[in-house]
């Protein structure tokens, strides 16, 4: 399948229609189905196993996606950019597959060498969970490579199918296990570890035949490794900032604040729904902006960035106001009456911070499209500094202090990212058409 990048138009409505066409609806539906599947997996397995045994599955879930997402999101980003910008897509695919395979092998070696320690520390000396962790991390790596390939070629229908099958592969087997009365957590762990493999393989089969445009020159090995390294740094700093509030509440809460800390964490789950949906934004936006930059189309690039900024701004207002009005009700319905201890303004602050981080992630895609991977981590580093300053200087009670720090740090990240993108778009405008070199990529 070969997709020609959309050409810019001058009306916001037509640009919005273009961004929403070509299988993007299937992608969004796939993400929603995947969310439901994840919820079913966790809910059904938790009820079937009970809190004690389910703890093993939940630890495996957390570690798999923390390690997998942190290490391998850059593979999707760089591959999608290279294919969409016609920068030697076939060569880029081979090289990124090689680098990803090397990283998976390194993780496997580390898990093998430290298997006894990991087993005793995290999984109550059940070695089968360490093997499931290795298989699960490799599956996440494979999924991100496939996602980069599908996003770069514009095959969003197959991308959505990947998510739908992944959801089914997680949810249906655990329903069967629970129905059969299985109370050993290891089979549930293997369902989670293999679902990514199944979804990715089906996504590839649906996508065939794939067509990657010839032409262009792939980044040399030093440039590719530098790009992936900076994207990895961006991934780690962004994940750190997104999870720092949770860690801060857990570490700083005293005995009298333990209940409040639990309520905060439940509210944060609701407030972070926009970050989950960002996967659809990345899949669509990065290839499109990469093609604009490769063509030297500064006007189209600027138009798309402004359109995205308008969409994210409107979504931020709606989501924040909605959280203030009904956020506490949602928490109470999903988690129970005992969690009804957080106010509407608290929910609004958490949602605002999450939406601002979503805006920064979106602007990161523009930086990557402009081959400014070496700068994409700067906004998150600035946000980490802002978070530390806000937490350390505020005299408010703990939860208010953390909420203020979240909003302040998120505002700093989006401001720095917007400044960087505006500066680089100005440089793109000064280049002759088709002459954009992306100098500074390394």
Image: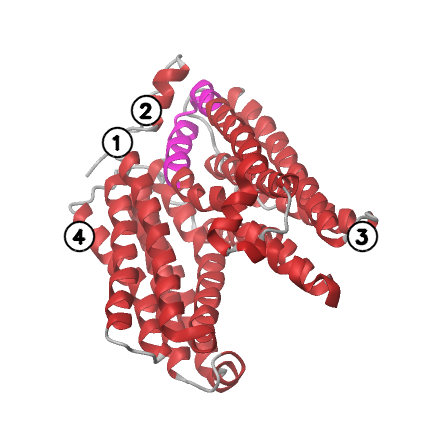
Q: Which mark is residue 18?
A: 2
Q: Earlier in the sequence, mark 3 or mark 4?
A: 4
Quadrant housing residue 176: bottom left
- Which residue was labeled with disc 4? 205
Q: Earlier in the sequence, mark 3 or mark 2?
A: 2
Q: Which residue is more in the foreground, 58 or 67?
A: 58
Q: Which residue is depicted at the point 47% across and 29% down?
A: 436
Q: Are marks 4 and 2 in contact (CB under 8 Å)?
A: no
225 sits to left or right of 174: right
Q: Which residue is depicted at the point 45% across and 61% down?
A: 65
- Which residue was labeled with disc 3? 392
Q: Earlier in the sequence, mark 4 or mark 2?
A: 2
For label 3, count other residues whose C-alpha is less than 10 Å away and answer few (under 14), some (14-19) or many (20+). few
Q: Residue 254, can we see it?
A: no
User: In the rendered structure, which segment of residues is drawn in magenta?
Assistant: 283-304
Measured along the vertical axis of the image, is residue 119 above or below residue 195? below
Q: Residue 77's spot in the image, x, y percent?
A: 42, 46
Asked whether residue 302 is drawn in magenta, I would say yes
Image quarter where the N terminus lies is top left
Q: Which residue is more in the foreground, 421 or 408?
A: 408
Q: Are marks 1 and 2 in contact (CB under 8 Å)?
A: yes
- Which residue was labeled with disc 1? 22
Q: Which residue is depicted at the point 42% across and 42% down?
A: 277
């Amino acid at each position: 399948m070969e997709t020609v990048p959309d050409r810019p138009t001058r009306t916001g409505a037509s640009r919005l229609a273009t961004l929403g066409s070509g299988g993007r609806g299937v992608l969004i539906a796939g993400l929603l189905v995947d969310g439901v599947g994840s919820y079913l997996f966790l809910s059904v397995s938790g009820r079937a196993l009970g809190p004690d045994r389910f703890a093993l599955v939940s630890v495996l879930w957390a570690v798999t996606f923390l390690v997998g997402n942190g290490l391998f999101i850059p593979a999707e980003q760089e591959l999608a950019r290279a294919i969409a910008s016609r920068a030697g897509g076939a060569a880029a695919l081979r090289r990124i597959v090689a680098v990803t395979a090397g990283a998976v092998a390194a993780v496997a070696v580390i898990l093998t060498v430290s298997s006894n320690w990991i087993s005793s520390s995290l999984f109550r000396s059940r070695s089968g969970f360490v093997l499931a962790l290795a298989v699960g991390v490799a599956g996440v790596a494979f999924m991100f490579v496939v996602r980069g390939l599908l996003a770069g070629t514009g095959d969003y229908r197959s991308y959505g199918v990947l998510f739908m099958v992944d959801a089914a592969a997680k949810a249906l087997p655990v329903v069967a296990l629970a129905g059969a009365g299985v109370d050993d957590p290891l089979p549930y762990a293997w369902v989670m570890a293999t679902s990514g493999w199944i979804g990715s393989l089906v996504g590839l089969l649906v996508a065939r035949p794939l067509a990657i445009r010839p032409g262009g020159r792939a980044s040399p090995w030093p440039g590719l490794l530098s790009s992936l390294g900076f994207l990895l740094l961006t991934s780690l700093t962004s994940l750190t900032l997104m999870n720092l509030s949770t860690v801060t509440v857990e570490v700083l809460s005293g005995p009298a604040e333990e209940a409040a800390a639990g309520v905060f964490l439940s509210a944060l789950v609701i407030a972070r729904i926009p970050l989950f949906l960002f996967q659809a934004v990345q899949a669509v936006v990065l290839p499109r902006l990469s093609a604009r930059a490769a063509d030297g189309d500064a006007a189209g690039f600027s138009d798309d960035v402004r359109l995205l900024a308008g969409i994210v701004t409107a979504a931020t207002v709606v989501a924040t106001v909605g959280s203030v009005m009904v956020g506490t009700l949602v928490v109470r319905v999903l988690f129970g009456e005992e969690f009804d201890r957080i106010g509407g303004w608290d929910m609004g602050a958490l949602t605002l911070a999450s939406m601002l981080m979503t805006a920064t992630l979106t602007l990161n895609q523009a930086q990557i499209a402009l081959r400014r991977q070496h700068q994409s981590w700067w906004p998150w580093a600035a946000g980490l500094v802002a978070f530390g300053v806000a937490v350390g200087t505020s005299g408010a009670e703990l939860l208010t202090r953390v909420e203020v720090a979240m909003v302040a740090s998120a505002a700093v990240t989006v401001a720095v990212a917007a400044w960087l993108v505006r500066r680089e778009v100005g440089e793109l405008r000064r280049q002759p058409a088709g002459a954009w070199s992306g100098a500074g990529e390394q």
